[in-house]
Amino acid sequence: MSDTLLDFNSTFKPPEFQSGMAVRIYCPHMVTTWNDRLRAAFEEKRKSGRERFTARMLSDVSGVPYNSVTKYLKGNTSQPRGDRVRRLAEALDHTEQWIRYGDQPESFAVRLLGWVGAAESWHPLDSEDEYVEISLYDEDAIALEVRGMSMAPVYNPGDVIVCSRKYGHDISRAIGKDCVVQTTDGELLVKKLLRDSSSSKLFRLRSYNTSIEDREHVALEWAAPVSLVKRA
């Protein structure tokens, strides 16, 4: 899998294929491929409706070219480009997570040991029965590696940030969070996402460097709030 890197300007550089950014997890008990699950979802869709669902219809609904759809169903492509898996999954009434990874645990619980307060000290909880749920397989997950010191001490060189892309109206759910974003002008950035005063469809982007002014009135293709950081 090609690396995806953050440079010193808090911009990120995707590999040649966006799909190469997807989080891929090896599971020794997984005997099916994503193509197998795509075919299973396709057959399920064909049998569920009165009208016979075809590959051409899947192409029309998902917006994925027909020639690509037929290749995917035949298992001739190991990893599709961009957000095609997400679009195919939605057209087949399944989640991208299932098409990509199959039936795997979506989360696990970590014991909540204490809380952090003033003076950077932490204090144990009275109860030993409190847990925090950690999600493993967010929809449309991507991972980026940090290079340079522009985002320190929040993110340091060698850190890997994991996030999950949101589109359209769902972008507003990422407001107030650190996000990897792509603007409608094609810029690739890592910023804190804030509301814009002029329109609910535009956003304000805040840098980690306090000397840099906020960017206002920014239109986004998607935003991916950071959900997990793997420290170097």
Image: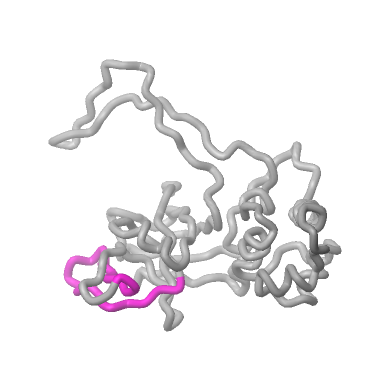
- The residue depicted at 53 percent of the width and 55 percent of the height is 141
**121 on left or right of 98:** left
211 within the magenta span: yes
**16 on left or right of 157:** right
Percent of width and height locating residue 12: 44, 70
44 within the magenta span: no
Q: Quadrant of residue 211?
A: bottom left
Total of numbered circles in the picture?
Answer: 0
| Magenta residues, start to end | 200-221
Which residue sits furthest left? 119
- The residue depicted at 65 percent of the width and 39 percent of the height is 104
Percent of width and height locating residue 136: 53, 43
**68 on left or right of 140:** right
| Rendered view: 110 above or below 84 | above
Quarter holding the N terminus is bottom right
- The residue depicted at 56 percent of the width and 39 percent of the height is 106
Towards the viewer: 122 or 194: 194
| Rendered view: 132 above or below 180 | above
Q: Quadrant of residue 202?
A: bottom left
**187 on left or right of 119:** right
Percent of width and height locating residue 126: 26, 16
Percent of width and height locating residue 109: 47, 30
Towards the viewer: 100 or 56: 56
